[in-house]
Image (cartoon, rainbow, N blue to C red):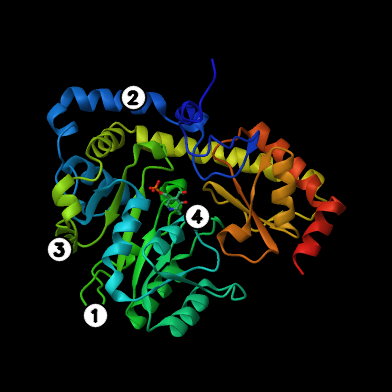
């Protein structure tokens, strides 16, 4: 029997599976070993048994009350300030659409999440980055605001375990960012996808919490916070939430999309509520933090063994999915790795010029594989042919 192209396409069930690679430290999502499959299966069964009409009906525009209360409990905020969503990506799209009248530029950090920028570009925005030479993120943002003040629609930031750097802004930096947003009268969209990868006791207040009650001069919330279940429960649930003042949420949720479809992901919002209530969400977040830390240690040990000091993590491991590794020749290592069946990304993908960093993601490899990948990537960095290729390319 012959297989047609469309048959083969139907075999592909997971984004990226069409292009498999042996040691994949590229993608920013949880692999099978880290997914809470049984908990989620139980939660769906319970929700469907206990609340069939709610589970399969249109939900309230802001999301079912138990889900809003569950997120509020997780974050220690008022449930009236929470709207359930179908994840951060979709909400970035809606917010980008809603802000079109405000200006044509979105300010992002010198390196930032590439696919958020893809969403913004879909809406015709230009992306303005802060200067990479400025190591203080607050000063960098102030300079960029000064430069683009007339055209800025909003600032997009991931202040907790950011993608790609894994950096977390201190509380002082967060307060300073809020002050800047007030001074320049610009809204901040806070992408808090990785908040649960930091233990609650160590997690600084989010920008959305710090800015709650503050408004821009045209009465928009100074900060809109976006959260996601993707990096704890799995991206397939497509569940997340938005944090903003209740009055604004009522207006926002009256957009045609929510009036027509109700809650953006009703059944998954109810599942999330169930998992928070029975403690599985917190247990799973703890497990994810623990396993990712083991993988990071293993990879870092691997590069230390073979890279002769050429590859070094840019900071202590603080959690999250990503490591940001100082590398003299990242584009050549990315290419060399691919040839050896190892995927890591050069910083260029996130806005960096070709000298600088590798982003390594620990979502889908075991600790043993991470160690092996670290050793081989480390060896590649010392390989003169890799270095020469980059040197020529970087001229
Ligand atoms: C910073 C950041 N924001 C958002 C997302 C996507 O979130 P969601 O799955 O909720 O759309 C990702 C996924 O990689 C991410 O790294």
How far apart, in angstroms, are the residues tagged by discs 2 and 4?
29 Å
Q: Which residue is mark 1?
A: 217
In screen coordinates, is 291 left or right of 69? right
Q: Is residue 389 visible to the viewer in this orientation of the structure?
A: yes
Label 2 C-beta lies within 8 Å of the nearest ligand 1 atom:
no
Secondary structure under the numbered disc 2 in the rendered image: helix
Query: Measured from the top left, where is residue 386 in percent x and y?
Result: 81, 53
Disc with the residue nearer the chain's start (2 vs 4): 2
Mark on residue 247? Answer: 3
Label 2 neighbour load within 10 Å: few <14, some 14-19, many 20+: few
Relative image position of residue 290 (x, y in whole percent): 53, 38
Q: Which mark is residue 41?
A: 2
- Above or below, comparing residue 170 to residue 269 in the picture: below
Which of the marked residues, 3 or 1, is nearer the chain's N terminus?
1
Residue located 19% across and 40% down the image: 66
Badge 4 crowding class, 10 Å Cα cut-off, few under 14, some 14 to 19, many 20 or more, is many
Q: Position of residue 266 (x, y in %)?
A: 22, 39
Residue at the right extreme of this rendering: 384
Which residue is more in the foreground, 92 or 16? 16
Query: Relative to 230, does residue 138 appear above or below in the rendering?
Result: below
Residue 178 location, quadrant: bottom left
Q: N-terminal of the two: label 3 or label 2?
A: 2
Question: In the depicted view, which residue is nearer to us: 343 or 173?
Answer: 343
Q: Which residue is mark 4?
A: 161
Q: CA distance from mark 4 to mark 3?
A: 30 Å
Q: Are marks 3 and 2 in contact (CB under 8 Å)?
A: no
Residue in the picture at 43% in, 54% down: 203
């Amino acid at each position: 029997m012959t297989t047609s192209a469309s048959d083969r396409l139907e075999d592909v069930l997971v984004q990226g599976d069409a292009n498999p690679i042996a040691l994949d430290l590229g993608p920013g999502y949880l692999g099978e070993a880290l997914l809470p499959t049984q908990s989620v299966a139980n939660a769906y069964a319970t929700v469907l048994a206990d609340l069939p009409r709610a589970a399969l009906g249109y939900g309230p525009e802001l999301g079912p009350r138990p889900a809003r209360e569950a997120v509020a409990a997780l974050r220690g905020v008022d449930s009236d300030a929470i709207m359930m969503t179908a994840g951060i990506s979709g909400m970035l799209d809606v917010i980008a659409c809603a802000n079109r009248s405000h200006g044509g530029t979105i300010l992002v950090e010198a390196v930032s999440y590439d696919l958020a920028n893809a969403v913004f570009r879909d809406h015709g925005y230009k992306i303005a980055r802060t200067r990479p030479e400025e190591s203080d993120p607050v000063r960098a943002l102030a300079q960029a605001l000064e430069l683009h003040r007339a055209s800025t629609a909003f600032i997009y930031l991931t202040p907790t375990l950011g993608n790609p750097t894994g950096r977390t802004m201190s509380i002082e930096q967060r307060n300073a960012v809020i002050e800047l947003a007030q001074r320049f009268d610009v809204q901040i969209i806070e992408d808090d996808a990785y908040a649960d990868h930091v233990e609650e006791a160590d997690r600084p207040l989010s920008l959305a919490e710090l800015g709650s009650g503050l408004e821009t001069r045209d009465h928009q919330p100074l900060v809109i916070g976006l959260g996601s279940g993707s990096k704890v429960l799995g991206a397939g649930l497509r569940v997340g939430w938005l944090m903003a003042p209740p009055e604004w949420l009522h207006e926002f949720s009256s957009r045609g999309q929510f009036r027509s479809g109700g809650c953006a992901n009703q059944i998954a919002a109810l599942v999330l509520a169930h998992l928070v209530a029975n403690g599985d969400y917190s247990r799973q977040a703890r497990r994810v933090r623990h396993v990712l830390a083991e993988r990071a240690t293993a990879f870092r040990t691997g590069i230390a063994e073979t890279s002769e000091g050429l590859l070094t993590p840019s900071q202590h491991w603080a959690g999250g999915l990503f490591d940001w590794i100082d590398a003299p020749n990242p584009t050549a290592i990315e290419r060399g790795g691919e040839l050896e069946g190892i995927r890591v990304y050069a910083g260029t993908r996130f806005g960096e010029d070709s000298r600088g960093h590798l982003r390594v993601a620990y979502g889908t490899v075991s600790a043993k594989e991470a160690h092996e990948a670290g050793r081989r990537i480390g060896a590649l960095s010392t390989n003169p042919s890799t270095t020469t290729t980059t040197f020529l390319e970087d001229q």
